[in-house]
């Protein structure tokens, strides 16, 4: 498996740049050091998830957009993403009809663009929506193998197609300052017919590619190749089978201010690269407990079995027995992922979401924030059933789902010390 270049072990070759206990923005002590080859190592030695929550959200939303009944632009069936422009306007990507809907900073509908299709400015399926530094809105059309760009006024700026964009990708697509696009392209998975395929856990390699913009794209550059989604190889009735494992690790990545953040979710380490692929910094958090252990495994078992509550007794018993047999046969990792999603904010801070095994049904409700240098800033607790999608200087925006599964855009203000 190919991975990023490793930082040499620290020894007499490094020099201390900053001990940031009293100078840093948070209360946890951080150290920034530089190793013998010039890479900055940011060491957060405490358990960052136990760090102080100095950034606190308002108890109630300061803005909510959406309705159960009413005008069409305010009815959401599948909020895929939320973008907040520099002037405060809000762009909502609605997956049901593939539209981008513009709202003013008070939630009043302005206009919409996009729509289902493969014509100019149309989208066949949302593969992530991101915002470039000049307020250009970047839409990955996963179904059409394209990147479609819109200006802040809703104008269609162009479409980029390439072989790389037609291939499957992991996560979102980002536009860098030179106009190129960053995508994460998984490699081939295990060959089920290979006689050398051994049972166990493996990771699919993922290449971070920089794709030139333009109607026909161009030759992509490779930033690096990293361990990506984990797969479990086992035998089912003597035949090799490949499944998604329990407690799956994968590749996390994002872009902020032309810095590329990449993490493999084990250990708690996030590497920072320039847009040109130079390795600049490694953000680390020690003493973060990621061991699977009996307590976490027991909580997972209870949660899975709890999902069967309400079924007829015979059906519940059969499914519970099937789950227990499957769990006993699966290859379980020693560690759970150290984190899940990355999200940059407008100030260049990096928000990192806590891993929870219920992620397929419930969004992460705890995040840790690192400043642009990689130092701990604060933990942040989000409201239940709120999926964080965008952060400005003083607000978080996300998708909130009510008890009737109706979706809304919601924003909470937050205060900094």
Image: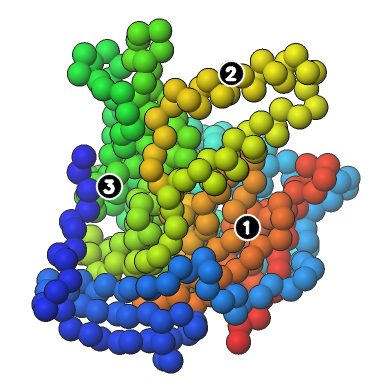
Identify the residue at image location x=21%, y=40%.
1
Identify the residue at image location x=80%, y=18%.
312
Q: Which residue is mark 1?
A: 365
Q: Position of residue 205 (x, y in %)?
A: 28, 39
Asked if residue 368 can be seen in this view, the reply is no
- Asked if 124 appears above or below 199 in the picture, the reply is below
* Label ID, residue 260: none
Q: Pointer 3 and pointer 2: residues touching (CB < 8 Å)?
A: no
* Label ID, residue 226: 3
Disc 1, SS: loop
Q: Among all residues in the image, which is located at the extreme top?
A: 237
Disc 3, SS: strand
Measure how far apart labels 3 and 1 are at the Cα level. Answer: 27 Å
Residue closest to the eye, 199 or 348: 199
Disc 2, SS: helix
Which of label 3 and label 2 is nearer to you? 2
């Amino acid at each position: 498996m190919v991975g990023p270049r490793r930082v040499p072990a620290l020894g007499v070759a490094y020099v201390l740049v900053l001990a940031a206990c009293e100078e840093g923005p948070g209360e946890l002590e951080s150290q920034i050091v530089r190793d013998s080859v010039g890479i900055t190592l940011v060491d957060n030695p405490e358990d960052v998830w136990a760090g102080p929550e100095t950034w606190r959200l308002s108890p109630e939303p300061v803005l909510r957009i959406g309705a159960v009944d009413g005008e069409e632009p305010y009815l959401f069936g599948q909020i895929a993403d939320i973008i907040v422009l520099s002037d405060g306007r809000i762009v909502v990507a609605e997956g049901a009809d593939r539209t981008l809907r513009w709202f003013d900073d008070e939630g009043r509908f302005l206009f919409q663009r996009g729509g289902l299709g493969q014509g100019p400015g149309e989208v066949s399926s949302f593969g992530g929506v991101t915002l470039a530094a000049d307020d250009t809105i970047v839409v990955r059309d996963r179904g059409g193998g394209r990147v479609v760009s819109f200006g802040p006024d809703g104008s269609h700026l162009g479409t980029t197609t390439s072989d790389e964009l037609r291939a499957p990708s992991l996560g979102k697509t980002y536009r860098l300052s030179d106009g190129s696009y960053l995508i994460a392209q998984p490699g081939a998975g295990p060959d089920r017919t290979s006689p050398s395929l051994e049972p166990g856990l493996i990771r699919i390699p993922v290449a971070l590619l920089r794709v030139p913009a333009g109607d026909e794209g161009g030759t992509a550059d490779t930033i690096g190749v990293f361990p990506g989604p984990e797969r479990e190889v086992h035998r089912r009735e003597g035949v090799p089978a490949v499944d998604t494992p329990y407690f799956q690790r994968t590749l996390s990545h994002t872009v902020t201010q032309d810095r590329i953040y990449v993490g493999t979710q084990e250990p708690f380490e996030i590497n920072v690269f320039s847009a040109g692929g130079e390795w600049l910094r490694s953000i680390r958090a020690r003493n973060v407990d990621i061991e699977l252990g009996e307590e976490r495994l027991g909580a997972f078992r209870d949660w899975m079995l709890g999902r069967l509550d309400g079924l007829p007794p015979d059906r519940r018993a059969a499914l519970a027995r099937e789950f227990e047999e499957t769990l006993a046969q699966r290859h379980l990792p020693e560690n759970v992922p150290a984190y899940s999603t990355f999200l940059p904010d407008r100030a260049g801070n990096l928000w990192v979401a806590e891993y929870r095994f219920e992620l397929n049904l419930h969004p992460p409700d705890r995040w840790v924030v690192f400043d642009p240098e990689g130092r701990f800033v604060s933990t942040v607790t989000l409201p239940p059933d709120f999926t964080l999608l965008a952060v400005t200087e003083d607000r978080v925006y996300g998708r909130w789902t009510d008890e009737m599964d109706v979706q809304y855009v919601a924003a909470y203000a937050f205060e900094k010390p």
